[in-house]
Amino acid sequence: MPVETRTFTVKSKTETDLIDITQEVQKAVSSSKIRSGTVTLFVQGSTASVSTIEFEPNLVQDFKDAMERIVPSKIKYRHTETWGDDNGKSHVRATLMGPSLTVPFKEKKLLLGTWQQIALFDFDVPARSREIVVQIVGD
């Protein structure tokens, strides 16, 4: 079964930043030699995640608010004692979400729901440049 691996870079802002990467993923699938299969996305780093969401401004804010309730910013994280970078919450949030996502595609079209977009969720404290690995598998 053929496999193609590519990467693309996304620049994020500080703290919890959600970035719609659906078009970049669709572009990678469309330009591959593979017509149908799955595309796996993996963000390199331990303070970011890849998932799906309805990329609508109020829902994006709802997500940020929910994440703040689940993994609050204003509590002590022991990770700070190790590195002094004050991003323990970023690591915990990314671990809960996970670093990867697999999406099926057919005839070079992602099989996403009507209101479903692929997003990078960057939880780190400083702004970052994130490398996304795209692995396309199929026929």
Image: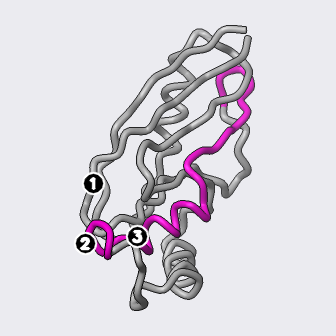
Q: Position of residue 55 (x, y in %)?
A: 54, 62
Q: Nearer the viewer, residue 55 or 75?
A: 75
Q: In the rendered view, tell whether residue 65 sits above or below residue 82.
A: below
Neighbour tally class for label 2: few under 14, some 14-19, many 20 plus, Cα within 10 Å: few
- The mark found on residue 84 in the picture is 2
User: Residue 83: within the magenta?
Assistant: yes
Calculate the distance from the C-alpha at mark 3 to the C-alpha at mark 1.
11 Å
Disc 3 marks a residue whose amino acid type is: Thr
Task: Name the residue located 59 percent from the left edge and 9 percent from the top edge.
Answer: 33
Look at the image and give the residue range highlighted in magenta.
Answer: 81-109
- The mark found on residue 136 in the picture is none
Task: Name the residue located 30 percent from the left edge and 75 percent from the top edge.
Answer: 86
Mark 2 vs mark 3: which is more N-terminal? 3
**Residue underneath mark 3:** 16
From the image, state whether disc 2 or disc 1 is nearer to you.
Answer: 2
Q: Is residue 108 left or right of residue 13?
A: right
The quadrant in which the C terminus is found is: top right
Secondary structure beneath label 3 = loop
Q: Is residue 126 left or right of residue 78?
A: left
Q: Nearer the viewer, residue 79 or 72?
A: 79
Q: In the rendered view, tell whether residue 33 sits above or below residue 82.
A: above
Calculate the distance from the C-alpha at mark 2 to the C-alpha at mark 1.
18 Å
Q: Is residue 70 left or right of residue 74?
A: right
* Contact (Cβ within 8 Å) of mark 2 with mark 1: no
**Residue underneath mark 1:** 128
Q: Nearer the viewer, residue 57 or 4?
A: 4
